Amino acid sequence: MENPQPGMRVLVPLGTKQMVGIVLREHTEPIPDSIRLRDVIMALDEQPAVNSAQLALWQWIADYYMCPIGDVMAAALPARVCDRTYSFSPVKKRRVRLPEYIGEIEDIHPLNDEQQRAKQEILQAWQTQETVLLHGVTASGKTEVYIHLIQEQLVQGHQVLYLVPEIALTTQLTDRLQRVFGDQVVVYHSRVSDGLRAEIYRQQLHPQPRLIVGARSAVLLPFSGLGLVIVDEEHETSYKQQEPAPRYHARSAAIMLAHQTGAKVLLGTATPAVETYHNALSGKYGLVRMTHRYQDIELPRVTLIDLERQYHRREMYGHFSDPLVDRMREVLQAGRQVILFQNRRGYAPQLQCVSCGQPPRCPNCDVPLTLHMQAHELRCHYCGHARAIPSICPACGGELRVRGFGTERLEDEVAQYFPEARVLRMDLDTTRQKTAYQDIIDRFARHECDILIGTQMVSKGLHFDDVGLVAVLSADHLLNQPDFRAYERAFQMLSQVAGRAGRKGQQGEVIIQTWQRDNGLLLHVLNHDYEALYQEQIAEREQFHYPPFYRIIELTLRHRDEQSVVEAARLLQRRLQGVFAERVSGVVVPSIARVQNQYIRLVRLRIEAGANIVRAKQMVAEQIDYVQTRHKRVQIIADVDPQ
Ligand code: ADP
Ligand code: ZN
């Protein structure tokens, strides 16, 4: 057998099993006796199944995010490609059939002056910079600018990768792209069937101008002649993979992919991540702005309502303040629609005992159970555990009261106070079926319903022509997160939700209810003042040693036995402190310290942005290995740049 080349799939013996592996490189150095060699059973391909640019990116991800390259491979290859019986040849001249082909091809819209200027500035910036941030207010028409840039790339015979935070939430976008670019568009994400994923993968091995639209993992596909990567809504946290490894950030991976292949990157958003904006201001990225909405529609008028005052005066209907109810009535009467945003699903976040003050908790996780009225049960949002609703407190037998509210409870209240209105609810519970999300969007867009109630799902880049009012029932939950990114996130979320108001023809209106009327963050939302938010946040980040001034590496230890995990965490903390001194936190007990019966402890490291991070990671890895050999059954996970 000839030596298989890097990137080829081979069948290899592993214990008593035979596994599919990928050849990384040919080994020419002498091999120490301690390493036992086994023969490759056979090569499965005549051509590499993974190209060299891909391998380089996988290696970078494995190194940067401190995980085995095998984990990256598992995330990158469609399941079917990992099957030994899968064959890349014979290559059929078959194109991917689009699941729902859209017949009519639509013309590309001409850009308006501001969009035209932005496009020229982007092209200009790419002369000297690989990555450009397009900071454009909601509905400024960023998508139209992308479309013009994509068209130029495709005409030149290049490939384009268009990353979106969550593909299920972007059907309006993919429809539009398919109408403009026809069958050059390929949509790639985890809900695409196994067979289709493998077919898309196979076709990507054969260079052809193509627009790949996909979520995070699309960045791991093979590309040839890649000209441009667009990262839309670049601030979205779903770009970072949490579980399992590789815990990579698709934005960072996209920038690295483009760097390695000579492509350009465009990051687009109305509310940049603080890190991204910092890079743009410091000149590392190009910066292009769009400050006007398409057709000069004004940004929505935002009003804050002081819940403390409203409750004090008893001017509330359930969770709706008097002024909100009045405005909703007027807007509905005028024949327009209303979006109600509450970022909690279920009926209420918890039941609480009036005697002992305790909520019924999950037996497997250290969290209160969430009340789901329609399903008649309490549910854990971490492990899915469900139980019947107890009539009395399980701990002391006291009376249980409902505390807080989720989308389900809002739906009940809307039915009570707006009996005539037609209502739809959009959250994880109502969109479990494949087409449910799309159905809700379509029905709301066709104005078959007057009020849409939803979680953050309703904030995602949707356009509805008739929405006159967007209301945030309570901003407080967003403001009170124990996280250094809480305000940044709250600003992003509230601005995005507000962006759903007033899209066609007239200024929209946003009402935000809150107990923290004087919170400065809300003032920035009111003034659409990203700059002010950024200046405050970056000053805090510098003062308290957070990114982008410091890099965080978070080490999570998990085990079923609390004592074991505590001992391992203490040992790891001491060892790291020996190397990194004050850059290491103490052993942190996280706010949710047990999930699915696993106890959790954390140790955090902060490394100066200018330090030798490669060396630092090596030293961290050595200490993890040291602790791992002494605590074999404790799981130790590294998360680089945790979100
Ligand atoms: P953003 O992504 O900046 O929030 P979009 O690109 O989605 O904004 O544009 C908002 C709305 O304006 C969409 O309905 C879009 O079709 C419309 N629009 C934007 N630019 C143009 C244009 N040049 N010609 C026609 N319609 C446009
Ligand atoms: Zn649980």
Image (cartoon, grey):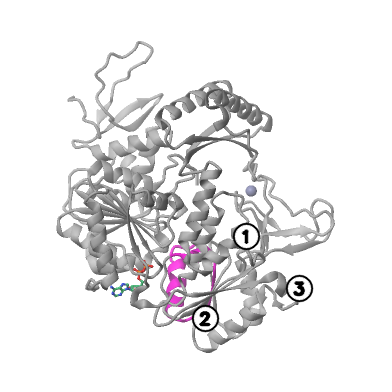
Q: Earlier in the sequence, mark 1 or mark 3?
A: 3
User: Is 572 or 273 nearer to us in this picture?
Assistant: 273
Is 75 placed left or right of 129 in the picture? right
Q: Is residue 220 visible?
A: no
Q: Quadrant of the N terminus?
A: top left
Q: Please give the residue where the numbered disc 2 appears in the rendered image.
A: 450
Where is residue 239? Give x, y as percent: 42, 51
Where is residue 71? Give x, y as percent: 40, 36
Please identify the quarter of the rendering in which residue 232 is found. bottom left
Q: Earlier in the sequence, mark 3 or mark 2?
A: 3
What span is in magenta?
A: 432-460
| Residue occupying the point 50% across, 47% down | 643
Q: Estimate the spatial distance between the alpha carbons at disc 1 and disc 3, rounded to whole Å.
A: 20 Å
Amino acid type of disc 1? His
Queried on whether the Cβ of the residue with tag 2 lies below 8 angstroms from ligand 1, the answer reads no
Q: Secondary structure at mark 3?
A: helix
Queried on whether the Cβ of the residue with tag 3 lies below 8 angstroms from ligand 2, the answer reads no
Q: Is residue 161 visible?
A: yes
User: Is 264 or 402 nearer to us in this picture?
Assistant: 264
